[in-house]
Amino acid sequence: MEETEHVARRLDRMLKNKKIDDESALKYLRRLRSIEMTLEILTKTGVGIIINKIRKESEDPEVATLGKNMIKQWKKLVPDKSEAPASCTNSVGNNNNDNGNNNDNKHSPESNNYNVCDDGGPQEAKRSRPSENKESTELSGNASRGFFPVHTLTTTDQVRLKAREMLQSALESGSK
């Protein structure tokens, strides 16, 4: 880990000075490639981000290729976003109301699924996708025409109904 931090500092210094020595960068990248990398080292040192910046700013294609290959290899260490780690817990209630009665709260922050993880990564709260996303399938048919989905009109709140009516009429008059 110490060697990785040392190399990361050197590469970061090159970035800050806006003077990337391609030979030195290549030497440091090869040194990093020989080190066995772990997710912990990657997150604590931020070396992946630094290498990506070096790769983009370097004029040497070998530096760019080596950096890209290393990042691609290291991405395999990062857990897939669709799978929540076992140490994660659900901190906010799921919106599993399939009966259609509580559509008013469908877009409230309380209805989203969030998994809180303490895996040492930079993001502690990670959002997980619901297994079924009925809303996106309902939106796809009406989205191209510019109308609101039908399921959002099932409210009895007079203020919301009036606001929707005004928005719809404004949109219709604007498109003519």
Image: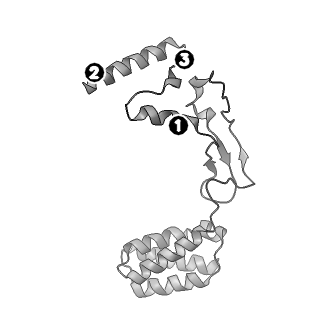
- The span from disc 2 to disc 3 (Cα, nearest Å) is 24 Å
Q: Earlier in the sequence, mark 2 or mark 1?
A: 1
Q: CA distance from mark 2 to mark 1?
A: 27 Å
Q: Mark 2: few, some, or many residues within 10 Å (few <14, many ≥20)? A: few
- Residue 30 position within the rendered picture, expressed as x and y whole percent measured from the top left: 53, 85
Q: How is the image coloured?
A: one colour
Measuring from the top left, give residue 12's x and y in whole percent.
Answer: 47, 73
Please name the residue that numbered disc 3 is placed on.
155
The residues tagged by marks 3 and 1 sit, at their Cα atoms, a distance apart of 20 Å
Q: Which residue is mark 2?
A: 173
Is disc 2 in contact with disc 1, using a CB cutoff of under 8 Å? Answer: no
Upstream in sequence: badge 2 or badge 3: 3
Q: Residue furthest front?
A: 141
Badge 2 amino acid: Ser
Q: Amino acid at mark 1?
A: Thr
Using the image as rendered, state which of residue 17 and residue 30 is in the foreground: 30
> SS for tag 2?
helix
Lateral position of residue 135 relative to residue 92, left or right: left
Between discs 3 and 1, the one toward the N terminus? 1
Mark 3 falls on what kind of element? loop
Q: Residue at x 58, y 24 (%)?
A: 103
Q: Residue tagged by mark 1?
A: 137
Residue 100: x percent and y percent?
62, 24
Picture quadrant of residue 60: bottom left
